[in-house]
Amino acid sequence: MHRRNFIQLSASLAGLNLLQQSCRHRHIQGTIIGASSQVGHLLRDKSFAEPKTVKEHEVVVVGGGVSGLSAARWLYQNDVTDFAVIELEDKPGGNSVSGANEISSFPWGAHYLPTPNNNLPEYIEFLKQCNVVTGFDEKGLPIYNDYYVCFDPEERLYIHGSWQEGLVPKFAVPQKDVKQMDDFLRLMNNYRYAKGKDGKDAFSIPVDESSRDEAFAILDSITMKEWMEQQHFSSSYLEWYVNYCTRDDFGTTYDKISAWMGIHYFAARKGMGSNINYHDVLTWPQGNAWLVEQLKKRFEKQVITGSLAVKVQKNGDAIQVNYLDVRANVLKAIKARYCILAVPQFVAARLLPKDDERIKLVHQHMHYAPWMVANLKVGQLTERSGVPACWDNVLYGSNSLGYVVATHQLLQQDIKNRNLTYYLPLTDLEPAAQRKAALQRTYSEWVDIIINDLKVVHPDIAEKTERLDIMLWGHAMIQPLPGLVFGNTRKRLSAAVDDRIFFAHTDVAGISIFEEAFYQGIKAAGSVIQHKNGSIII
């Protein structure tokens, strides 16, 4: 057979195979949803006229993610109640939003809280107000509501044809690899309690509370992979595990992420509760959307959804924020004494008056990881051998992070159907190329990827999946590449503008976690209150 004919035949067979897969999965109903990227791109692609209406408030918060809601909550608690929160989406929460069907709620993004560190009083007080912390024991340790502590069994890993307990590879793993993993985890535990010459924890939450001791800061100059090579960690099982962890928390592979931030993943958490340890997690069927509800419940009517901020500028002694009322297609404005920009820096750079240095810093250093998240409504699935179904279910060697069972926290466990939330950080290409590729992929192609991945552990997943919906996150989280944590970029971008515009977002911290967003919000709101009252609040 001539080479050309062979290639044509191969292409035909490949196309036939893809068609067969699509036909096989055609019974699965669902759709692709996502953050409002088309509306958001108007900020980049369209010029706007003058606003039709102008309202006045003392403070305007742009962005209704966790950091923006945290800022608004802190203002409200400190008697600054004349504010508005502008949010593009129909629901606030950023990447902590959720969905729901007749079975249960389910997360579309962030879905758990690790045990809080004990040196975060404002955070623990918030959790107390939510009844997540129900009291304190005789040692002063928080007592966590058992209903919100992840039920057993918590996590499992499919490896070498069987499910094992826990995510650190162990089943049928050679002893030399087990030893390397034990050595690595022992070293991470040493880092957990290490302190710098300045007396601060080497790795802390919030990030800016960490020691700046050069002995630790130098880790921000190399990648996690390079650091592991320097430490002679060569086990392929360990490399997979570390890469899984960095993709899980940062949407970034271990050969790109800052070694300091890679170690931070393991070493920054040291919280203890009366009934839980630092490695335990708190979770809800809808994930962190439950916490979003708690953040906003006292000022919910002051959150203006479906609103795209298009310009932030000084107007006399005030800050004016122009925004598009998406539903009415009308440009409006808010004039305020202060503005908190709780949006990513690539958005802030377009909202503010042109600043070439800011734009350059954002373009060079602020890169955002895209994700795909899917929710599968499934019947009773065939299970492989080993540990039974857990809350978190991970496949060794998969490009995905596996799935969490959204119905795991329900007290009623005799339900026939479940919601599985599947996570896939898109790390094969550079972020911009990956975003483009993700948007071009069809629903059927996404279904094939998900089903082909999960059928390794659930051979009847295609037949048992009744509905599959897909969420695309184009800019899900900041990538903490080498130099971001201890370089000058974060400091420059987070500096207040004219003592009237303050920033609150996890990208100026270098890490997208709930606690960081919570404290970014408090910090910005505290700056507003300090400037307003002439006194330090936090």
Image (spheres, helix red, strand yellow):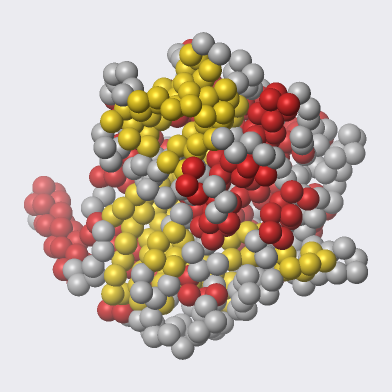
The picture places residue 178, in percent across and down from the top left corner, at 69, 67
Examine the image and state in which quarter residue 48 appears. top left
Q: Could you say which is closer to the camera, residue 241 or residue 62?
A: 62
Residue drawn at x 47%, y 43% is 303
Q: Could you say which is closer to the camera, residue 276 or residue 479?
A: 276
294 displayed left or right of 372 = right
Residue drawn at x 61%, y 50% is 514
The picture places residue 122, in percent across and down from the top left corner, at 74, 48
The picture places residue 220, in percent across and down from the top left corner, at 68, 34
Q: Locate the N terminus and report the quarter of the image it occupies.
A: bottom left
Q: Locate the C terminus and report the quarter of the image it occupies.
A: top right
Residue drawn at x 66%, y 24% is 491
195 displayed left or right of 10 = right
Question: Can the viewer see residue 456?
Answer: no
Q: Could you say which is closer to the camera, residue 479 or residue 182?
A: 479
- Please say if 85 is above or below 498: below
Examine the image and state in which quarter residue 181 appears. bottom right
Question: Can the viewer see residue 76?
Answer: yes
- Please say if 138 is above or below 127: below
326 displayed left or right of 322 = left
- Please say if 140 is above or below 154: above
Residue drawn at x 31%, y 79% is 464
Instruction: Please tell me how many numbered marks the rendered image carries.
Output: 0
